Amino acid sequence: MTESSTATADPRTRTDGLGWVTRAVFADARVGLTVDGPLPAGHRTVARYAVVPSPARARFLLPLGSTRATAASLLAYNALRPTQVRAVRAVLGGVARLGGIELARFPALTVSVPDAVAVDQALLVHRLAALLGWGPVFAACGVRPPDPNHKPTLQLFDASGGPLGFAKIGWNDATRALVTAEAAALRELPAFTGVADHPVAPRLLTETGWAGQAVAVVEPLPPAVRGLPTTAEPQVAAVLAVARRGRPPAQPRPLAGSSFLAGLTEAAQRAATNPSVGERVLAAVTGLVRRHDGVSVEFGHWHGDWVPWNLGRHAGRLVAWDWEHSAPDVPLGFDLAHDTFQRSVVLRGEPVGTAAAAVDGQLRRYGDALGLDPAGQRLVADAYLLEMWLRTWRLADAGAGWNPVLHPALLDLAIARYGR
């Protein structure tokens, strides 16, 4: 099927990234979408986007109708992006400032609705603008290959290019749960942003349902925020502040009888019904308890995805975003373990055994600062690895598919460690 033969077809029928994104963003069947084609009969145009560089190789949907908003959608937060992406966006952003996106004749996605339909009843962006009392809103969206674990995220701008926020769209069971969890976490966080060493977090602006989706809008990050280097030392004081939320250190409690272990066991029992897992995950929980049931550690909150690419600095304060895995009552030190594990697996491409050894080493290094004796350090590492596998299962069970880097290797590793 050639690019020209599908130019005017509704992109929601595509199986690639452009199809995935447009199905999520324009979920109402009354909305018409055409690429360089005529409007459906009886429709009026309500928005236009440049498809960059083309429908077959789409990377961006850029809003048209305001050169400032178009440029901002490419240049905002560019300092947080990888070097190569930053360079491409900087060039395109400069072109957009001069009105060159329209002149470049990128394919145009035209969004239309029937003449009798109110635009804020059919289009998500307009609905959000109405809910939040905004004027005209322009939305930009990155396009990536379809992935059941990822959420289309809209960058929202006003006509002058001022950032308004980010709209995260949960479109399947896995991503709806993540959007809902982040909204719940962000509702609680403003009370703790004055706590010493606690990171600043974007506020939740609104949460709503839309065409079967879960949508959360969070405020924009500070324009001058700068990302942390991937080689930055762990932010141990901030990890403690997130865990304790301004309270003094809690009395250590044993793993046995904890609500954390109860939740872990319940999740493992559900996971055991998966034929590819079976009783092995229950054996992992049994091994964890056998090895650590009498060990006591402090329990508290965690961010849940504490990694350098979700952290930055602004005005001397640490900023943290993407709280979708946040949860209470986990062993203190989980965020440090996650930071170390993800740097190993994601940044260095190391296998899970190497990543687990790195977690062990980091917990030994910072154990005193976290109030963990050697037995507590081993409990945190072992419990984190099983929790991480259960996260992998939750996403797979909700439709995201197995992460081949983590499954079955991480479950195998957990069983092997607990059997020692």
Image (tube, helix red, strand yellow):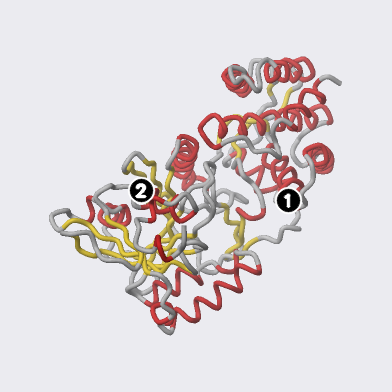
The secondary structure type at the circle numbered 1 is loop
The secondary structure type at the circle numbered 2 is strand
Against 212, is 155 above or below? below
| Residue at x-position 48% and y-position 42% | 182
Crowding near the residue tagged with mark 1, few <14, some 14–19, many ≥20 C-alpha atoms within 10 Å: some
Q: Position of residue 57 (x, y in %)?
A: 52, 63
| Residue at x-position 58% and y-position 35% | 401
Q: Position of residue 72 (x, y in %)?
A: 45, 72
Q: Nearer the viewer, mark 2 or mark 1?
A: 2
**Disc nearer the start of the sequence (2/1):** 2
* Marking on residue 114: none
Quadrant containing the C terminus is top right
Rendering quarter of residue 232: bottom right
Residue at image mark 1: 234
Q: Position of residue 223 (x, y in %)?
A: 50, 68
Residue at image mark 2: 206
Q: Position of residue 261 (x, y in %)?
A: 64, 21
